[in-house]
Amino acid sequence: MDEQPASEQIKISVFTPIIYVGVLLSSFIAFSIIYRKRRLEKLVSADTLFSENHAQNLYEFLKEQYNDPNASSDTKPHLKVMKAALLRRGAEAIRRSLKLKENEPIFNRLYQEGHIGDATFKSFTISTKLQEIEIRDIVIEVENMKKGWTQQFFATCQEICFNEALRRRLNALDERHSVLSELWEYTDKDVSEKADQQAISNTESDPSSEDHKSTPADASQDSTPSNNPSNSEKKSKNKKKSSKGKNK
Amino acid sequence: MATEYTYDEEGDTWPFFVIAVLTFILIPATLKWLTTAFKGNDPISYNANIKGAIVEDAETLELENKKKIKALEKRQNSARIFNKTLVFLILGWALVVFLALNYTKEADLQGTFDPYAILDISPSATEKEIKSKYRKLSLKIHPDKAPASAKEEMEVAFVKLQLAYKALTDEPTRENYLKYGHPDGPQNVSHGIAIPKFLVEGKYSPLMVIFYFLLIGVILPLVVGSWWNNVKTHTRKGLHVDTSALFAKKLVDRNPTKVITPEVILDWICQSNEIKTIFPKLSVEQLRSMVHSYLSRDPSPLEGSSEADVLKLISKIPKLIDGFIDLAAVFRAPEILISALDLKKSVVSAVKYHGRHQELLQLPYVNAEVVEKQPVRKLGKLFSVDKQEAGKILGITDAQKLDKALEIGAHIPNIRVIEASFKVPGEEVVTPMSSAHLVLKFLVKSPKHKSAPEVTEEKFKEPETIEYFKNPFLTNEEQPDLPYLYAPYFPGYVKNSWSGLLIAQKDNKMIEGGEVASLTHLDLSNLELSQEEWLDGGKVAVSVFKMPLPIPTAPMPSKTHFRLILKHNAYFGSDIDIPVELVVKPAPAPENKPASQNEEDDDSDDESDISDPEEDTIAGAMAALRGGNVKKSSAAQSESDDDEDEDDNQSVFTDIDTDTEDEKEK
Amino acid sequence: MNVALGYDSKSKKILLPEDIGEEAADLKLEIDQLNTLTADLIASGADVPPTPSPDKFNKDLSKMIKKLYDGGVQAFRQEKFDESVKQFNIGIEMIIRRHKFEPFQGTLQELSLFLMSRTDAQLKNKNYLKAFNDADMLLGMNLSTPDNFLRRGVANFFLGNYEAAKADYQRGLSFDENNSRLHTELEVCLDKLLEESGDIL
């Protein structure tokens, strides 16, 4: 076997091991820094579940203006506006808390069964915590504005929350109408009539007689309601409906 | 002697090393490539063997998109075979062959010594045999007998023969052989490194260091890291983490005023990570318009994207919808699930989800404008009028095409429900606190069939063996596989299946803990029967589908209402939507009551002034369990399914509605 | 906030600049809600909104609303369905304009009566999609009475959604198994479904 003669010396510089260790360490450090930064970015961008909280932002904005000593009387919001903004903020907080509570078992199950990743579940828990903090902030603001109002404040906020939700639904009826109309390719008698009146310049007389005249007009349009309930059925239904009306 | 390392100076061992490494990688890679390359199955031939299947696709129907679809299929097929792996495999094997032929030298198996082979005997030979063989062979290969040219070889062989004989008979030699594998004692064993010396100790040694460094410090972490990343970036259900986060966020933060239509769900899907990575340059609106042009079967090309892109996008969508449905099922809102299933139908069938004529539009050759203007909407109606009328309805003038279209229409499976009920395995009635399952008995029916035959209970009998008792869902698997879909516009092959939802009528939500069930085995042979055979009933196949109930039944006798929805994954007109009742009856009372006690009970019942206990009270439950009389409470309050009562309603008005119910009655 | 908001000290309302686009729709909603709340607070005259309790319900408004309701019902009985719908519309508008901090229960009650009657009027008036929306809203507020299912079912029937109508009737029956109206309508619906597929029972 070949054996290295003991006398032969290999020249290596003193710095080689140092350089080696140095390169190794620096690459590890660089890697860990970059990795942590990326993870932090990811966590920060994995934002809360809800979209921006406008109510909170509005309140803060108004508060700034209110407390701004340089603002003229024109731009400074009235106290009532501040109260209203705070109430709005409270109502929004209640809405979000209710929604989070409602979705808590759902998110737990989603996470358990592997439907969502760690980041999403984390953002859910973060949202819940943020909401708690938000409520605490609101309480502080309430006390600042008027002492002892807190109890009543949240009761009022709850009412406001529900009432506003009701209003939102009512106001959305028109939009729902148009969406469903498009999906089912169906237009109501009223709407198709209005379109008729605009399309055809010569209109018929009073609205009540258009009951019968609308049927041929309907057929001429593209999006005809393709339901033909037999007339007899309709009449029998009408009879039932009117008797129902009397029960009121 | 200490083992020292020798290097491959002569250059005869390194080829073996390289060959070994290469084959180690190549053989599994080749196997894998072979299995994927030739996995392609032909749905037409598969379907041809299944009764009731539709054996048509874009090519057989000569549809206008046939070129596009065929081109895509060809591309997919060739991509399976002619890909980078193949190049790698070819190069690898070529290298192996090249090395084997040119660089390997005859391996000199000097080390091994097999006396049995030399003497040409079996390992279990007796001494007599050994001796006789030795004598014979020594006569044959004696060096004196050999010709001059082969003298040396003969000598070597003769020595070997003698050694072999000794190894088997002579004691010390034998010991040596057993210990060291060679009769002459321990041989000189050398270990070597199969790499030429110049690589390790010469001026190329830094190369080796760098190579190892790269391998262990760079390639290994990269491979492991990317594998780990892949695992981390996808949820257990197969969706990308970002996509599932998007879906979850949309579902949580959805506006209750907004109607969730298939359009909305399509919008969400087009924002998903999977689609975005494939089409990074396209906006969501562009993606949506691509889908719409596909749904309207619009042959004109879209600007900004090619036809291949459209098909690629379409092929990804059903899987994403499935992932979405899995997630949305946990939110338990049926409207969303139904919209998603409708979207999937539209995408697979290439029929738009607007309007109400989808049943007719899914057929080939139809004239969409004609169809949408007329009132007929269902396939069944087509078969109740004469052929000419049907042609007018569909807007098809060519008789052959009309025939084909009607043939396909006749093979769209409809479901005729016979019975839907809940059952507890092993019991006659559904008992409290038991685990029940839904049993759906039905007939597969073609739209051309009218009415339905009488089906006796006998046909539905299933064997009452232990396996069925333990796992009643075995019957789901025992029915034949469903064939591939008739989906000539869809890129790829999908099999028929139905998705099942079980919804509680009280709050219109899916049952807590419920999942979307899947019907993948069904006998479609009924579709081939004629109307007479259908009515006669002899050849009619009956079908059963079972779905589990994820929660135990109520603890007290009660009646709960459910709604079962089964939606097909592609065809329109194959769905059902039926109410199902779950009646929980008290466990059957023990039968052996002594006669005297019975009489006593009767007497006391007649005399007592106390009325029978109400159903909902504890006294009522006790009485029921004893088999006594209970007064039934009004139907509206009989739902005592505790789980459902505890559920929060999704709307904001949780604490209000119960009051207003009473108020309204005024 | 990157949107310049204006403030009008006279009306005490926050103003959104005109050129705001689609994306800020929720901001616009937020500001609308805030402005209405401010207006309510000012109109109530008190320092802070009163604790919600049933007696705080605005009586005068209630009287007016009741009058509108009665008017609508009367028009209904006289078969003047357009007129009836108009009355109900105005009534609902008034309900909307109630102060947000009035007790929700009362508002809900009033509104549900109006919606139910408006649904009926719209059905009679053949505006089936509008009727459907009203009935849908009632059911969305969890007023799951058999009558409301009947309403939505009938609306669905006339819209041509026969399967949905069937599902509605069946769901209504799950709450009240002996409801004769629902049974009859269900029969009609099933017949219609059979007829639509050219099938026989």
Image (tube, helix red, strand yellow):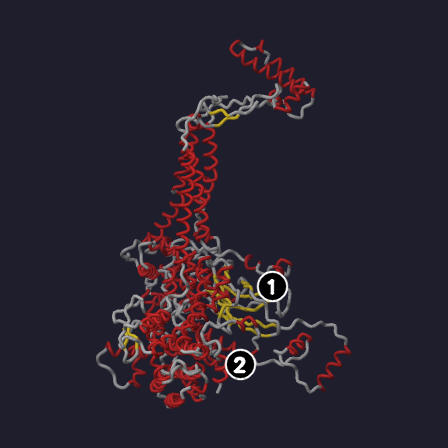
Task: Name above or below for residue A184 compared with residue A33.
Answer: below
Q: Whole-percent x and y of residue C77?
A: 39, 90
Residue B486 appears in the figure: no
Task: Name above or below for residue B45 compared with residue C171.
Answer: above
A246 vs B478, left or right, is left
Disc 1 marks a residue whose amino acid type is Lys
- The N terminus of chain C appears in which quarter of the rendering? bottom left
Chain label for disc 2 = C
Q: Quadrant of residue B432?
A: bottom right
Tag of residue C116: none
Tag of residue B461: 1
Disc 2 marks a residue whose amino acid type is Asn
Q: Nearer the viewer, residue B355 or B259?
A: B259
Task: Name above or below for residue C152 compared with residue B87.
Answer: below
Task: Name above or below for residue B4 compared with residue B486.
Answer: above
Q: CA distance from mark 2 to mark 1?
A: 33 Å
Chain label for disc 1 = B
User: For numbered disc 1, what is the local secondary structure?
Assistant: loop
At a point 48% along the width and 55% down the height, the residue shown is B236
Label 2 Cα crowd, 10 Å radius (few <14 / some 14-19 / many 20+): few
Label 1 Cα crowd, 10 Å radius (few <14 / some 14-19 / many 20+): few
Q: Nearer the viewer, mark 2 or mark 1?
A: 2
User: For numbered disc 2, what is the local secondary structure?
Assistant: loop
What is the number of callouts on the image? 2
Q: Nearer the viewer, residue B338 or C89?
A: C89
Q: Quadrant of residue C3?
A: bottom left
Residue A54 appears in the figure: yes
Q: Whole-percent x and y of residue A86?
A: 38, 75
Q: Which residue is mark 2?
A: C178
